[in-house]
Image (cartoon, grey):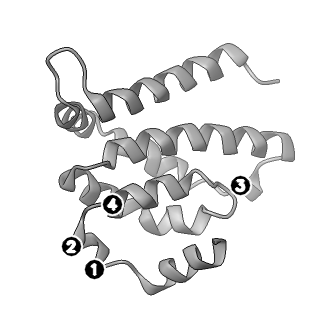
Amino acid sequence: GIDKQKFQQFSDICNHIRTLCRYGSDGVTSGQVQGMLCQMEFLSHVRYMLTLDPKDFSAGCRQMLVKVSGLLCGAAAMFARGNHETQNLTMKVVPNASTLMDELPGCALILAEVFRGNLELCQRVPEALIRQFGDLA
């Protein structure tokens, strides 16, 4: 079965990361939080999750993967938000995130924040990704 307590702890951590990356905290700016997460190699966890193939999981586990990936993708989106350095780092997961977007909808959050307000990265958006987003609409 699913360890509900561990899932709740994971959810709390991801939501706290999202909040810190967006608003900062006592005397620490959001950019500083993003920088600390870079130093802790936060993105390596996202990168690993995006290498998982949902088809390798049973139906029940796949549902949990969607929930867990949604939480982690939400945190990763805030990690990238409004910071060209973290957007550039997060750009490295775009190919995997775009491949998994149909099965793991949270990946769309990462894709949106990687490009938001970053003209340089927007000019490098692969045409296939634009088509994929168009197909979702």
Mark 4: which amino acid?
A: Arg
Going by the numbered disc 2, the residue's amino acid type is Glu
Q: Is residue 19 above or below residue 67?
A: above
Picture coordinates of residue 113, whole percent (x, y)? 38, 55
Disc 2 versus disc 1: distance between alpha carbons? 5 Å
> At 61% across and 62% down in the image, what residue appears?
100
Q: Residue at x 27, y 71 (%)?
A: 121
Contact between labelled residues 1 and 2, with CB atoms less than 8 Å apart: yes
Image spot of residue 134 (x, y percent): 58, 78
Decide: few, some or many residues near mark 4? Use Cα within 10 Å; few <14, some 14-19, many ≥20.
some
What SS does tag 3 mark? helix
Q: Which residue is mark 2?
A: 120
Q: Nearer the viewer, residue 114 or 62?
A: 114
Q: Is residue 34 above or below residue 89?
A: above
Residue 54's mark?
Answer: 3
- Label 3 vs 2, first from the N-terminus: 3
Q: CA distance from mark 3 to mark 1?
A: 31 Å
* Quadrant that contains the C terminus: bottom right
Alpha carbon separation for disc pair 4 and 1: 12 Å
Estimate how packed mark 2 is, as few (under 14), some (14 to 19) or many (20 or more) residues with alpha carbons within 10 Å: few
Quarter of the figure with the N terminus: top right
Picture coordinates of residue 40 (x, y %)? Answer: 27, 33
Residue at the spot x=45%, y=54% of the render?
110
In the visual, does 129 lie left or right of 5? Answer: left
- Residue type marked 1: Gln
Residue 25 appears in which quarter of the rendering?
top left
Residue 74, horizontal then vertical, whole percent: 49, 42
Q: Earlier in the sequence, mark 4 or mark 3?
A: 3
Q: Which residue is mark 1?
A: 123
Label 4, on which residue?
116
Tell me if 56 is positioned left or right of 58 in this view.
Answer: left
Badge 4 or badge 1: first in the primary sequence: 4
